[in-house]
Amino acid sequence: MPGHVHYIRAMPGHRASASRSKKNHQSAPPAACPRPLGFCTSEVPRQGIFPPRQKSSPARLCQAAHLARRSPDPRNFCTCALCLARPIRRDLKLIKRQPLPAAMKAALSALAVAAVLAASFAHAQPEPHTGDELSINAAGATFPFPLIDLWRVEYNSLYESVNLNYQSIGSGGGIKQHIEGTVSFAASDKPMSGSESERAPGTLHIPEAIGGIVIAYNLPEIHRSGVQLTGSMIADIFLGKITRWDDPAIASANPGLELPAEDIITVHRSDGSGTTFVFTDYMVHVSPEFDEMVGRGKSVPWPSGVGAAGNEGVAGVVKTTPYSIGYIELAYAFQAGITYADVQNADGTTFITPTLETLAAASEHAAEVGLPAAHEAWDGVSIVNAPGSDSYPIASLTYLLVYEDLEKSTDSIEEARAVVHLVHWMITEGQQYSSSLLYVPLHAHVADIGKAGLKRVSYEGELIWEEKYQIPQWIKDNALWWAEGKITDEDYISGLQYLISQGILKV
């Protein structure tokens, strides 16, 4: 953390000397070290301000005691002469000297360094709401509802004054309410289309999780998951071309399995659904005939079957209807104890069981498709039928929809700040809860897309998450002292190299 970094520290008005003696160090008044624990007098400074050329015993340095207290404020570090001339790291390991290229050294100046540092240090996260009780209303996809509901509980346990009310009404309903500005934010498994984005300009797509859609079935004679289906078989079932469970095509993919001689009952979503969009997106990838007859969308013209609202509705119908088959999010199947199929991978080499691991393998494809920035168009993003022998083929990102200008969907600056903090928490700390519900936690680079988007959010022209990190004075001082020749080029460049190696300074 930037707050724990401490490199060339010299007292104003004098050079930090590499030859200061132990005697001189001991003669400094006790007040020079605010926490004298006997460590300061145990070492003689070695040549060079940054870093010491030989490893010292961390247990005998002042900073050992200070860091043990986990103080986040650099001003709380020891200010005695010896400690001021030593680097401090949280793990107390000394840094290897790695000189910067000469061209970089020549390009740096005190003002340039200060400017780069100012751009490099960022506020760790948005500020939480700590005032009166506040409610945030959101609505949308049923696909991520189990995770959002868990987030609601966990977030409220941390920030009791903020209550999230989330209506699990489907992606179509969520997008509609987002466009109308009747919810603070929405959730959707389907990115907004071009026409929808025109009706809701300034919408950010914030990836919140990666999940999978399973082909759930109810076969009383087969009390287990694992019936094997190819993508083309699934398409033909929902097109009404395969109508019986003992069809030769299904039997050929399941040798040795005694399939019932019963009619297949298909179950699909009756509402505008992101889950339907992802499922039909997969169907059009594997079946040109499905693409021609049904197509891809939140709502499509199903040739036959039973309709039900929400993932919960489809799961309920499948669970209570023998010989039925439907598509639902993995978490719903798992929670309801519904059996589901293994689906052939994109390579056509094997059948893949939907698990956290096979969804994670599919999610790796998200790193390869070149995801856009949060404020750009996402309607072309898809990770279904991802390549890889162990990738489950019906996987998808799911999104939070947030306005850049939260005046459109919130009633106050306080609510806007609470929304930004909540969404930031969901895509960072909240990811620790994803795996327990069989959602894949976001990769760091995907979460960064969301964080960068949140930094664009404003209310009445005021940025909600403004980078207000104050550059520690010791960094400013070192830039000044280097410019004035009070510390050497070698020492200063070493300090810069340390900041770069830690990702604190970006050049």
Image (cartoon, rainbow, N blue to C red):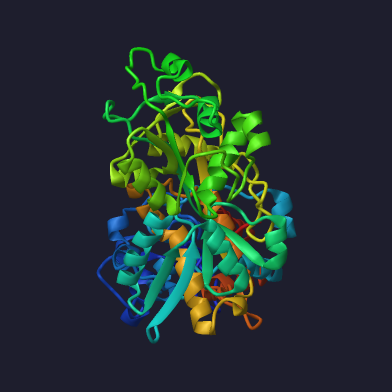
Please identify the quadrant where the C terminus is shown.
Answer: bottom right
Q: Quadrant of residue 489?
A: bottom right
- Tell me where residue 407 appears, x and y as whole percent: 61, 80
The answer to which quarter of the image holds residue 353 is top left
Does residue 441 sit above or below 130 in this rendering? Answer: above
Q: Nearer the viewer, residue 157 or 499?
A: 157
Q: Residue at x 58, y 72 (%)?
A: 467
**493 and 27: which is toward the camera:** 493
User: In the figure, is residue 270 to the left or right of 58?
Assistant: right
Residue in the picture at 63% in, 58% down: 374
Q: Residue at x 57, y 36 (%)?
A: 282
In the picture, measured across the screen, residue 417 lies left or right of residue 59, that is right
How far from the left and from the top, in percent, is residue 85?
46, 65
Q: Residue 45's x, y, as percent?
A: 41, 60
Residue beneath the point at 34% across and 76% down: 33
Give the camera-side residue of 276 and 87.
276
* Furthest residue in direction bottom, as rendered: 132
Name the one closer to the observer, 418 or 282: 282
Examine the rendering and report whether any part of residue 121 can be seen: no
